[in-house]
Amino acid sequence: MRSSNPVFSRRFRGNNGYAGFNAAPQAGTAAQGGNPYAQPANPYATDPRQGAAQGGPDLQQGYPQAPATTGRMTMDDVVMRTGMTLGTVILAAVAGWALNVPVGIGYGAALVAMLLGLAQSMFLRKPVPAVILAYAAFEGLFLGVVSKAFNHYAQGAPVQAVLGTMLVSVGVLVAYKTRLIRVDRRFVRFVTAAVIGFVLLMMANLLFAVIGGGDGLGLRTGWLGVLVGIAGVLIGAAVLALDFKQVEDGIQYGAPREESWFAAFGLTVSLVWIYIQMLQLIGVLNED
């Protein structure tokens, strides 16, 4: 299991397919299609040869072997780890705001957070809580600095962005649980392409801003800035739906307990993405 956010992770490609746990579909699902990421075997099940050697059922003969319940990820694990990471983000953001951290240091913290996120998602084979919490701390410091900057010319923007992020998160959760959002392979491909395209567009806008000054391509001002902000929020919401799918699959198919750190990491990255897009959208709407 990898972090769900495609900005930082390889989660959209597992060992043999797309996002999710490549787990076998449960018996009784329609056409054995309950898990849209289903592959021939559950990667968290024990080796079938070991089961046969120990006198247990032989998976090669079609008898599924349920993983042991001990040491498996639970919803409580995900909630607790997510609370820790989001709590770290909030505390660091409050510190960055209260201590009047310079903008330059704030952007430096964002760079460090990005590097830590990339390291955890792409290079470390297992979740490292210290790296994830360090990411949360540096990301929070950046959010505190940028939130205070936005608040100077758009009074109350950070509070509005927080409320907007909460509403979007609840809306996505309800839509996911009621299956208004169906996370399948097509959905994953669409979201992956949207995230990559959006990030490349923002990088191009930043490059033109550095070279030519001003707002670069004008993607963060005027009516175009509003459209880009809305698109950014919608993309973040779609990624959050992928997070919910990853958590659901991890619990259902017996992911190791340590994977709850990856789930917490993915949820935190997605929520930070939505908050930043909300903040920028509110800033554009408050332009004179």
Image (cartoon, rainbow, N blue to C red):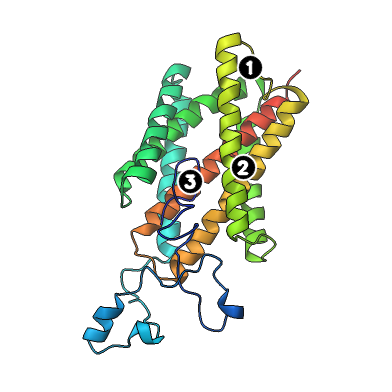
Which residue is painted at 73% across and 33% down in the image? 227
What residue sits right under mark 2 in the picture?
194
Of mark 3 and mark 2, the one earlier in the sequence is 2
Of mark 3 and mark 1, the one earlier in the sequence is 1
Per the model, the C-alpha gap separating discs 3 and 2 is 19 Å
Q: Front-most of 213 and 274?
A: 213
Per the model, the C-alpha gap separating discs 3 and 1 is 29 Å
Per the model, the C-alpha gap separating discs 1 and 2 is 21 Å
Q: Where is residue 146 in the image (x, y as percent from the top left)?
A: 53, 25
In the rendered view, tell whether residue 276 sits above or below residue 35: above
Tell me if residue 102 can be seen.
Answer: no
Labelled pair 3, 1 in contact (Cβ < 8 Å): no
Q: In which quarter of the image is the C terminus?
A: top right
In the rendered view, tell whether residue 216 sits above or below residue 32: above
Q: Of discs 3 and 2, which sits in the foreground?
A: 2
In the rendered view, tell whether residue 110 sits above or below residue 209: below
Q: Front-most of 29 and 90?
A: 29
Q: Where is residue 3 in the image (x, y as percent from the top left)?
A: 44, 50
Mark 2, secondary structure of its residue: helix
